[in-house]
C-alpha cells in the first residue's frame, strides 16, 4: 500500500460535475459509545481521521466556486479551502440537553426512526444553499448523545457522486 501524499492539487471536475445539482446530501451515521466515553478524546480522533481523509481525498478539502474561465453561467470549479472560516468538524454536545433527550439505546431499540432525527438540529447545514453562500464540498458535525454519537456528513451533491 502506498503512502498518503500531502494535498498538492485541486481536483478537476468532470463536465457533468461542473453543472450538477448544487444541493447537499446529508447523512447521519449512528455509533454506539460506552456510557462513560470521553467527548474530548472521541473528538480528537474524529478530527485526526477527518484530516487524514482530506489528504487522501483532496476534493473534501475544497469548496465549489464559480468558474470565471467559462462562458456558460452557473458552471463551478473546485478551489482549496485555505482559510479557517469554515471549521472542518463542528462538535455538538447533546448529552444533557432537553433539545435531544433521546439516548442511543432508545434510538437503537426503535431501529433508528428517521422521524426522531431532527435534521435542523443534527445536520450541519440545509440541503439547498442560499445565494452567495460558500459551498464547501464536505462538512461534518459530531452530535454526542447519551450512549453514542450521531455523526452527520454533508457532501455537495455535484462532487459526491462523480469521479473527482
Image: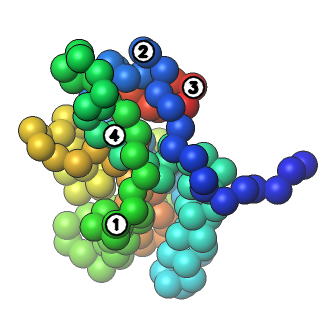
Q: CA distance from mark 4 to mark 3?
A: 15 Å
Q: Residue furthest right?
A: 1
Q: CA distance from mark 3 to mark 1?
A: 25 Å
Q: Which residue is mark 2?
A: 16
Q: Nearer the N terminus, badge 3 or badge 1?
A: 1
Q: Residue furthest front?
A: 69
Cβ–Cβ under 8 Å for marks 2 and 3:
no
Residue 97 image point, x, y percent: 24, 75
Q: Is residue 74 left or right of residue 77?
A: left
Q: What residue sits 48% from the left and 81% below the top?
A: 39
Colour scheme in the image? rainbow
Q: Which residue is mark 3?
A: 163
Q: Nearer the N terminus, badge 2 or badge 3?
A: 2
Q: Which residue is mark 1?
A: 83
Residue 38 image point, x, y percent: 54, 84
Q: Is residue 6 left or right of residue 37?
A: right
**Viewer-closest of 30 and 151:** 151
Q: Secondary structure at mark 2?
A: helix
Q: Which residue is mark 4?
A: 64
Mark 3 packing: few (<14 Cα in 10 Å), some, or many (20+)? few
Dividing the picture into quadrants, the one containing residue 92 is bottom left
Q: What residue sits 19% from the left and 35% below the top?
A: 128
Cβ–Cβ under 8 Å for marks 4 and 2:
no
Amino acid at each position: 500500500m502506498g503512502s498518503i501524499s500531502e494535498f498538492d492539487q485541486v481536483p478537476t471536475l468532470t463536465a457533468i460535475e461542473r453543472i450538477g445539482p448544487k444541493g447537499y446530501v446529508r447523512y447521519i451515521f449512528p455509533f454506539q459509545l460506552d456510557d462513560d466515553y470521553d467527548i474530548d478524546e472521541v473528538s480528537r480522533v474524529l478530527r485526526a481521521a477527518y484530516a487524514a481523509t482530506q489528504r487522501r481525498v483532496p476534493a473534501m478539502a475544497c469548496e465549489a466556486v464559480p468558474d470565471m474561465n467559462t462562458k456558460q453561467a452557473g458552471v463551478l470549479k473546485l478551489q482549496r479551502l485555505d482559510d479557517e472560516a469554515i471549521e472542518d468538524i463542528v462538535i455538538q454536545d447533546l448529552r444533557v440537553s432537553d433539545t435531544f433527550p433521546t439516548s442511543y439505546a432508545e434510538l437503537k431499540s426503535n431501529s433508528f426512526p428517521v422521524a426522531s432525527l431532527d435534521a435542523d438540529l443534527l445536520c450541519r447545514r440545509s440541503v439547498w444553499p442560499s445565494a452567495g453562500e460558500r459551498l464547501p464540498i464536505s462538512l461534518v458535525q459530531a452530535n454526542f448523545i447519551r450512549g453514542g454519537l450521531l455523526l452527520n456528513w454533508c457532501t455537495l451533491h455535484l462532487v459526491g457522486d462523480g469521479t473527482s
